[in-house]
Image: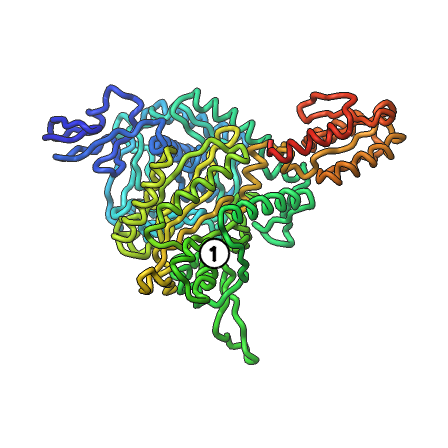
Amino acid sequence: MRVEVSGQSRQVEPGTTGLDLFADDPNVVALTLDGQASDLATPLSEGQVVAPIVNTSAAGLAILRHSTAHVMAQAVQGLRPEAKLGIGPPVEDGFYYDFDVAQPFSPDDLKVLEKAMRRIVQERQRFVRRVVSQDQALAELADEPYKLELVSLKGGARDDDGSAVEVGGDQLTIYDNVRRDGQVAWKDLCRGPHVPHTGYLKAFALLRGSAAYWRGDQRNASLQRLYGTAWATPDDLAAYRLRLVEAAKRDHRKLGAELDLFSFADELGPGLPLFHPKGGVVKRVLEDYIRQRHIEEGFLYVGTPHVAKEGLFHTSGHLPYYEDTMFPALVYHDDQGQPLEPRYFLKAMNCPMHNLIFKSRGRSYRELPLRLFEFGTVYRDERSGVLQGLTRVRALTQDDSHSYVMASQAAAEVDHLLGFITSLLDDFGLNDYYLELSTRDDSPAKADKFIGSQQEWDEATAVLEQVARRSGLELTPDPGGAAFYGPKISVQARDAIGRTWQMSTIQYDFNQPARFNLRYTAPDGSPQQPVMIHSAKFGSIERFIALLIEHYGGAFPTWLAPVQAVGVPVSLDHLPYLERVAAELRAAGIRVEVDAGDERMQKKIRHAQTQKVPYMLIAGQADADAGAISLRLRDGSQHNGLPVAQAIAEITAAIRERR
């Protein structure tokens, strides 16, 4: 029979598998058959399009990591036979698995488990896929209550981040770990695919344990989660360990406390950050910057309420398609305690209210593109298991904008927005980025998760893809990652240590204009429906601050630094002189403090360094007599006897040029 392999037609014997095709390449861990990821052991069929999945690709690493999660779970049940299995998906840079156990896992347990995992790897146990009926799955997994729940849901379960945990797609499947003698060593309910055998897992490590809740819901059982990582080679694992060390130094939660930028309080609730004065400076500077940039790019500043009647969110589609991420309704009651209509909701998005602004009066084609922008604080009832510092919060402020355009203007507007975004990222030194195109999931199980016709989706996706390709930037697909109302481009930026962060988004929306009956008067006098393009440049300002803290390691460039300069007197006798110098700096718009404490000068310098202040102004008697200072930079270099005016010029230039 004939199949197409990596773009070339090949004749193969019936019964040929991916293991046969790629026997000479140990880096191939799975394959795609007509675009669907499958085990290498899957027999090929006439006319299929076959492509290898290698262990260094994103798909290959996910398969490696998921297979390693199975090995970890097998080791756990070997150490603690009473452990009940939750779920164990791959995640960015690694994997986890949840367990119902009597005692949390200790660091010593992790060492024992790693040794057990290595023994399993050495046995080269095969991952063997079986399709089972629901009754068969219920019988085989009778001792696994969480798996039984998944069987009953059959693909409807949700992970902590709200994503689906499918257990077999349209089928229920179990993977057996089979030893060389044919004995089944362990099994798990799983969709797959997996590597052919455990010998493929050459570079992994267990990282830590934590508490978790079944399906991410605090109302459910408390579980223990084990995190691990797996890579294609030992060198890749070693490089990742180094990145972990550097990432720990840059952790925005740690630096946020050390630099007195923000905090969280139990009394307030999880996911609700408090910005301290220094953090407030960073937030204000970013807000001023992005507000001015939007104005320069032709946007009009608007403001909208934090709550609205539920009917608004039914019209927008958020309640039918997004309600599980919204906070529960706010309900008024009458004197007898009976609920009154209408109910109100905290807004999870700003777009419905911007639609009302567009609709508030007649619009002409001459007004288009009409670009509306606001700093809108929105509220999302994120599950506690996914809250993480400023990167995932429940109250977030978006630099949210919406462009209303004629369909013929859509491509030009997307191009305009993409140029706006890339110039913005360059201002922050985030100049290593690529694009991701998120499209709808056309599988039957997800068909009801998206609004609009296939033709509308195809046209919208084509516009985004054409603009993205014209940009010359790397473009990667994200099938199924679109919002319910339209496809999107997201800008993925790499930080100083190579980690990828999803940044700005551009979303093409043909649905909300229809649902809100938005119209403009065309040149021929006819009413026409606009296209709505959502864009967020920072995304949320909270998450952007987290990214900047970690990208800069807390050492903000001068224009963003909460304190741009600190005066350090050689002795307290020189305080009055430094106070006069500081007044000159403030008059020039520089954020400056003077350290008037009783500590010695060297200790004050060390404190300024730990606070990552860009400039230190050191002054003794000779400096005071000469009207000068010693300007010490954050990197330790120092310019002595510098006239104060020259020091001010140096600092203001660094601010103005956003060095």
**Mark 1 crowdedness (10 Å alpha carbons): few <14, some 14-19, many ≥20:** many
Q: Give the number of marks.
A: 1
| Residue 423: percent from left, percent from top | 49, 37
| Residue 641: percent from left, percent from top | 79, 22
| Quadrant assignment for the C terminus | top right
| Quadrant assignment for the N terminus | top left
**What is the secondary structure assignment of the residue under circle 1?**
loop
State the residue at coordinates (87%, 30%): 574
| Residue 411: percent from left, percent from top | 35, 46
Is residue 502 something that shows in the picture?
Answer: yes
Residue 172 lies, with reference to residue 105, above or below; the image says: below
Q: Amino acid at mark 1?
A: Met
Which residue is most to the left? 1
Q: In this figure, which residue is indicated by the disc labeled 1?
A: 349
Residue 323 lies, with reference to residue 506, above or below; the image says: below
Residue 575, quarter of picture: top right
Which residue is most to the bottom? 336
State the residue at coordinates (69%, 29%): 650
| Residue 569: percent from left, percent from top | 83, 29
Q: How is the image coloured?
A: rainbow
Pick whichever, 328 or 256, lies toward us. Answer: 256
Q: Is residue 258 left or right of residue 153?
A: right
Q: Is residue 25 left or right of residue 335?
A: left
State the residue at coordinates (47%, 42%): 420
Pick whichever, 656 or 460, lies toward us. Answer: 656
State the residue at coordinates (56%, 40%): 546
Is residue 386 something that shows in the picture?
Answer: no
